Each structure stands twice: as structure tokens, then as C-alpha cells.
Image (cartoon, rainbow, N blue to C red):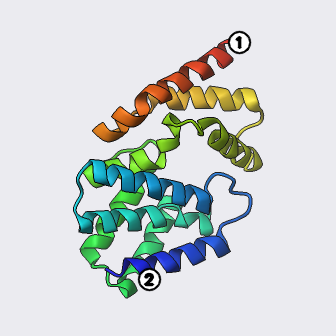
Amino acid sequence: MNFTQAETFILAKLKKELPNSLYYHSIHHVMDVLQAAVEYAKLENLSEDEITILKTAVLFHDAGFTVDTKNHEEIGCGIVRETLPQFGYTSEAIEIICGMIMATKIPQNPRNLLEEIICDADLDYLGRDDFWEIGNNLYKELEIYGILSDEKDWNRLQLKFLSSHNYFTNSAKMLRMEKKDSHTQRIKEIVDSY
């Protein structure tokens, strides 16, 4: 697996082809998820090969947004199957990567540790101090695409999402649950004030 070449390819594609209207699903998000995934990989004692597969899946997990905002996970898997063989990835590795990408689809449904780690990394910000700033970017994106009409809708959606969300790995639970619960409580107070 030539990870460096795969990384160079996908980062160039994302920079060139992701729409500017994606305030949340941007290259910044991909790099943020990558950083979180590497942190969780170390805490969960992954092997070097597993880390390479994880990092590849993270870099490609929102590649489908270069084509369409709907079903971007399926589209991303198509991009993975089309491009990764040229970088020395086996069909087995490619299917593991596609499983990881599909696991990030909401509602998340991971079936193994690698899928759990990418899911936790993808929503790592829910339990961090930059939650409000990142959430605001998602709000702007959803508003542009006509999914939300106002901030009240956004806060109700966030409360519903946060209330049903769970981290999967012990590492994420340890690092992020307390802060996520605090954010959930704050949004509940905001929604209750309507």
C-alpha cells in the first residue's frame, strides 16, 4: 500500500473538486478527522497496517462530496475502488476501507474496531471545546442546501442528534463523553427556552 501516493492524490482531488459551499464537509474536516483517528488508533493499539488502512479510509470518507451531497458514502466507495488499486491496495484492503466509509453514514453502524474508530473520529468534535465553532459551519452548510430554515430548527436537530449519539470506542468515551454531555445539556436549555 503506497499511502503517500494515495494521500497526495485524494488531497489534490478534494482541494480542487469539493464545492466552496461545504463549510463543514471540507478538507479541514477531513484533516481534523485524520488527526482524531490517529490519536484513537494509538490508544486502541492498532497495528501499522491497520493504521494505514484507517488513515486511507479517513482521507477518502467524504470524497463522494466531490460528486454529490446525497449518497456520498456510496460514491466515495466507487472512488476508492477506482483509484486505490493503482496505489497497491489489495481488493481485501479496499473492501475494508469501503466498510469503514459506509459505517460513517448516519445513523452510524460500525461492525468492527476499525469502523468504530472512524465513526468516533468523524464525530470527535461533539465532545471538544471547538464544538460550537464546528457546529456553526455545519449549520451554515445545511442552511445553504435548504435542509434547515432557522437556528431553532438547527438546535432542535442538534439536540435530537446528540441525545441519540454514542461513541463506540473506550478511548472516545473516556476522552469525549463528559464534554459531549455538557454540550447536549446546554443545547437542551436553549431548546427548552423556545
Q: Position of residue 86 (x, y in %)?
A: 39, 87
The tag on residue 68 is none
Q: Name the residue that disc number 1 marks.
A: 193
* Residue drawn at the location 32% of the way across and 40% of the way down: 171
* Residue drawn at the location 50% of the way across and 79% of the way down: 8
Q: Position of residue 170 (x, y in %)?
A: 29, 37
The tag on residue 5 is 2
Binning the other alpha carbons within 10 Å of mark 1 as few (below 14), some (14 to 19) or many (20 upward) gives few
At numbered mark 2, what does the secondary structure look like: helix, strand or loop?
helix
* Residue drawn at the location 68% of the way across and 32% of the way down: 154
Give the residue type at disc 2: Gln
Binning the other alpha carbons within 10 Å of mark 2 as few (below 14), some (14 to 19) or many (20 upward) gives few
Asked if one can make out residue 82 in the rendered structure from this viewpoint, the answer is no
Viewer-side residue, 65 vs 44 = 44
Q: How many numbered dots are placed on residues in this image?
A: 2
Q: Is residue 26 left or right of residue 152?
A: left
Q: CA separation, marks 1 and 2?
A: 51 Å
At numbered mark 1, what does the secondary structure look like: helix, strand or loop?
loop
Viewer-side residue, 59 vs 69 = 59
Q: Position of residue 52 (x, y in %)?
A: 32, 68
